[in-house]
């Protein structure tokens, strides 16, 4: 049971993990695209791999999967 809500609702921790991962991905993805396609890459050794863009894409995909998979549904709350 969720402490402190007073209603006895249970929300999976994985929903919050997915939401936070999705938020990070939505920040990194446009910034990585701006770096890559705007030719604003930092002068580092592996800048040709565009890690900000790829990590942003990966985090957005995983965050979307986890958020939709563990979205709190009414029938799950009614079982309690």
Image (spheres, rainbow, N blue to C red):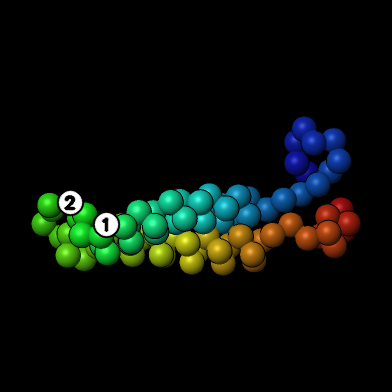
Crowding near the residue tagged with mark 1, few <14, some 14–19, many ≥20 C-alpha atoms within 10 Å? some
What residue is shown with label 1?
35
Q: Quadrant of residue 78?
A: bottom right
Crowding near the residue tagged with mark 2, few <14, some 14–19, many ≥20 C-alpha atoms within 10 Å? few
Residue 24 screen position, x and y as percent: 45, 51
Q: Is residue 65 visible?
A: yes
Q: Is residue 64 left or right of residue 58?
A: right
Determine the residue positioned at 51% across, 56% down: 22
Q: Which mark is residue 42?
A: 2
Determine the residue positioned at 72% across, 51% down: 11
Circle 1/circle 2 CB separation < 8 Å: yes
In the image, 42 versus 38, the foreground residue is 38
View extreme (front): residue: 38
Q: Is residue 30 left or right of residue 10?
A: left
Determine the residue positioned at 75% across, 41% down: 2
In the image, 38 versus 16, the foreground residue is 38
Determine the residue positioned at 35% across, 54% down: 31
Mark nearer the N terminus (1 vs 2): 1
Q: Quadrant of residue 29?
A: bottom left
């Amino acid at each position: 049971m969720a402490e402190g809500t007073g209603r006895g609702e249970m929300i999976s921790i994985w929903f919050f993990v997915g939401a936070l991962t999705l938020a990070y991905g939505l920040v990194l993805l446009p910034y990585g695209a701006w770096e890559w396609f705007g030719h604003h890459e930092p002068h580092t050794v592996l800048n040709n791999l565009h890690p900000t863009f790829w990590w942003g894409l990966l985090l957005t995909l995983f965050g979307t999967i986890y958020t939709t998979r563990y979205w709190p549904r009414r029938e799950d709350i009614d079982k309690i």
